[in-house]
Amino acid sequence: MLSIKQVETENELLQILNLQQLYLAGNNNETEEKEQGFVTVHHSLEKLKILHALAPSVIVKDGEQVVGYALVMLQEAGNIFPELFSLFEMLKQLKYNKQPLHKYSFYIMGQICVHKPYRGRGVFELLYRKHKELMQEQFDFVITSIATRNTRSMRAHEKTGFQTIHRFTDEKEEWDVVLWDWTLDA
């Protein structure tokens, strides 16, 4: 039976890392990544512990096994991940509804992943619904960036309510910055 909760134990963090390794870009063939999606940033246990201390992430479990996760990355965590520094800097320059992003209260979806056997069963939506339930009082929206070649993730985010606010290219990928505005539902 599936349950959803915030991360509480180091074992759950380790299970997140195991799932991350299964679906990290480059760990599967190109066709698999195109059809099933992928995650792009490798985390260490130490970095997950820091993220967790700032704001616990959300997981879906089947019994004792973590089968999906959605990492909360507060803006204060931007200096923890050098590979994301340029994203955090770019966000400082972006606008939403003609206002600079910094005028809003938001956090970044640090990464979302669902174990392949559980895809198509509503786990992705469950993760984001729980995020909204837990975070909507504090934040206007959640924002993330998605590699445009990750079409499965792009479709899932659009279905959830995310909209693209910016597109950019770095040295490796083309990305869409997407935002789910919770104030529209209020």
Image (cartoon, rainbow, N blue to C red):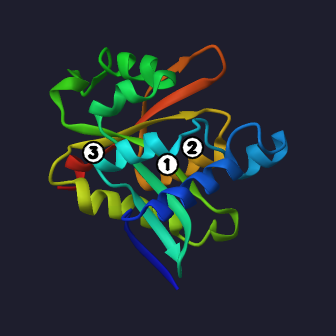
Label 2 and label 3: CA atoms lie apart by 27 Å
Looking at the image, is mark 2 or mark 3 earlier in the sequence?
Answer: 3
Give the labeled residue for mark 3: 54
Q: From the viewer's perspective, is 53 left or right of 176?
A: left
**Where residue 7 sits in the image (x, y, percent)?**
39, 62
Any mark on residue 96, and which? none
Q: Looking at the rendering, which quadrant does residue 51 occupy?
A: top left
**Where residue 85 sits in the image (x, y, percent)?**
43, 20
> What amino acid type should be assigned to the residue bearing mark 3?
Leu
Any mark on residue 157, and which? 1
Label 3 and label 1: CA atoms lie apart by 24 Å
Mark 1 Cα-neighbour bin, 10 Å: few <14, some 14–19, many ≥20:
many
Q: Residue at x 24, y 54 (%)?
A: 135
Give the labeled residue for mark 2: 154
Between 43 and 179, the one lying in front of the other is: 43
Which residue in the rendered view is the most extreme toward the bottom?
Answer: 1
Q: Is residue 32 above or below residue 125?
A: above
Q: Quadrant of the C terminus?
A: bottom left
Q: Residue at x 61, y 50 (%)?
A: 20
**Where residue 149 sits in the image (x, y, percent)?**
68, 34
Q: Residue at x 53, y 82 (%)?
A: 63
Between 9 and 123, the one lying in front of the other is: 9
> What amino acid type should be assigned to the residue bearing mark 1?
His
> What amino acid type should be assigned to the residue bearing mark 2?
Met
